[in-house]
Amino acid sequence: TQAIAAGGADALREALAEGEAAGLLPEELEGARALLGQEERRAVARSTLHEAVAIRDVGRLHSALQEGECVGLDRADLENARQILTEEERRSFARQRLQEAIRGRNIPTLSDAVSQAKAAGLSEADLAVGQRLLEELEGAAREEATRQEAAAALEEALCERDV
């Protein structure tokens, strides 16, 4: 236990080697070997968690957080990963909602989805198709409104002429 406090797994490995060299019995080394196994598992979990944080993959973050909790990683490491997981889940949801809104081609729904995607921090590339389609749909709606206004004005003028 002092070896872990002093230098982690490396110090524990060294202490085990010294114990073996001094002729300690296997059962006397058993506790230290168990601690070494736990420390090594913790180191692997920490590395996996850091990798998952770096690539910001939702599935890997979930798995790495679960393993990190099981082996008792530091609260700060786990909280940082949870925060990134929350951000990435929000982005994923916004991306999915934007794709659905693009397929639906409904102006209010698409406008909301684009706004949500921007707020979630999606890249310009992720937003481009939705923004372009929204502009096209709004332009077509304005043209249609202008046509309808012109048709109504024409009909009104014709009605006034009949009088």
Image (tube, helix red, strand yellow):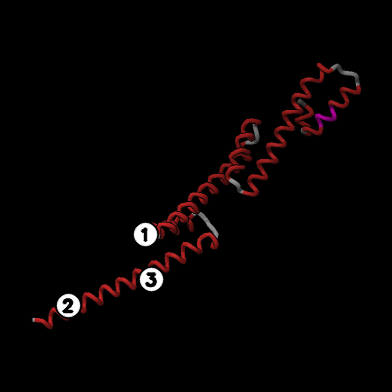
Residue 11 in which image quadrant:
top right
In the figure, is residue 94 to the left or right of 78? left
Residue 29 in which image quadrant:
top right
Give the residue at x 79% y 34%: 7
C-alpha separation, residue under disc 3 versus residue under disc 2: 26 Å
The reply to whether dot 1 and dot 2 touch (C-beta < 8 Å) is no
C-alpha separation, residue under disc 1 versus residue under disc 3: 14 Å
Image position, residue 20 (x, y; %) = 88, 22
In the figure, is residue 81 to the left or right of 133? right
Q: Main secondary structure of the magenta part?
A: helix
Q: Is residue 103 above or below residue 23?
A: below
Give the residue at x 67% y 44%: 50
Name the residue that disc number 1 marks: 108
Image position, residue 121 (x, y; %) = 52, 56
Q: Is residue 35 magenta?
A: no
Sequence-first disc among 3 and 2:
3
Q: Which mark is residue 139?
A: 3
